[in-house]
Amino acid sequence: MRKYRVTSFLTLSGIRRIVELSDMTYGEWIIYEGRIPKYHIASFDGSKSSKKIDALLDSKKETLDTILTKINKATGQSLCERNSPFIRIKLSSELVELDLKPIPLEWLNMIEATTK
């Protein structure tokens, strides 16, 4: 478990909660399944999953969006990267303990096989 900053915004479509990473964060993404944060990609954490994603991104054949699209197609997931809404009113911000795992290595192995 790790603490993440979760900010609630009032948007045109209702209240949205977004997990925010620091402005100084590089090579890290929070991946959502629907509206729920599920995975944390951290390029420099040394995990096998992160190394596989780095290799796919470094090859210049894939972007994070194409990787997520291929995972969604192969597994029936609905993974996406959420950004802060453009039109919003900030309601609150709090530190919340979340257990965000790396993207499963099996999914990355499936899509790596399709890119070769």
Image (cartoon, helix red, strand yellow):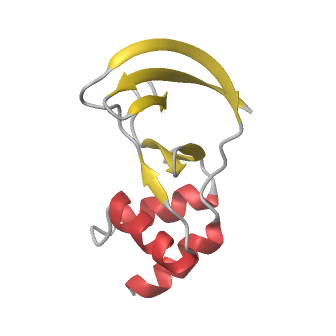
Which residue is most to the right?
A: 1
Q: Specify the quadrant that holds the N terminus.
A: top right
Position of residue 6 in the picture relative to residue 58 (left or right): right
The residue lying at 66 percent from left, 22 percent from top is 96
Which of these two is toward me, 108 or 8? 8
**Spot occupied by residue 110 in the image (x, y as percentages of width and height):** 55, 80
Which of these two is toward me, 73 or 9? 9
The residue lying at 49 percent from left, 12 percent from top is 92
Instruction: From this view, report whether residue 48 is shown above or below residue 16.
Output: below
Whether residue 58 is visible, yes or no, is: no
Instruction: From this view, report whether residue 91 is shown above or below residue 71.
Output: above
Whether residue 19 is visible, yes or no, is: yes
Q: Quadrant of residue 14?
A: top left
Position of residue 71 in the picture relative to residue 58 (left or right): right
Which residue is most to the front?
A: 13
Q: Specify the quadrant that holds the C terminus.
A: bottom left
Number of numbered discs overlaid on the protein picture: 0
Instruction: From this view, report whether residue 72 is shown above or below residue 44.
Output: below
**Spot occupied by residue 34 in the image (x, y as percentages of width and height):** 51, 51
**Spot occupied by residue 41 in the image (x, y as percentages of width and height):** 52, 48
The residue lying at 43 percent from left, 74 percent from top is 70
Q: Quadrant of residue 2?
A: top right
**Spot occupied by residue 13 in the image (x, y as percentages of width and height):** 36, 35
Instruction: From this view, report whether residue 4 is shown above or below residue 78.
Output: above
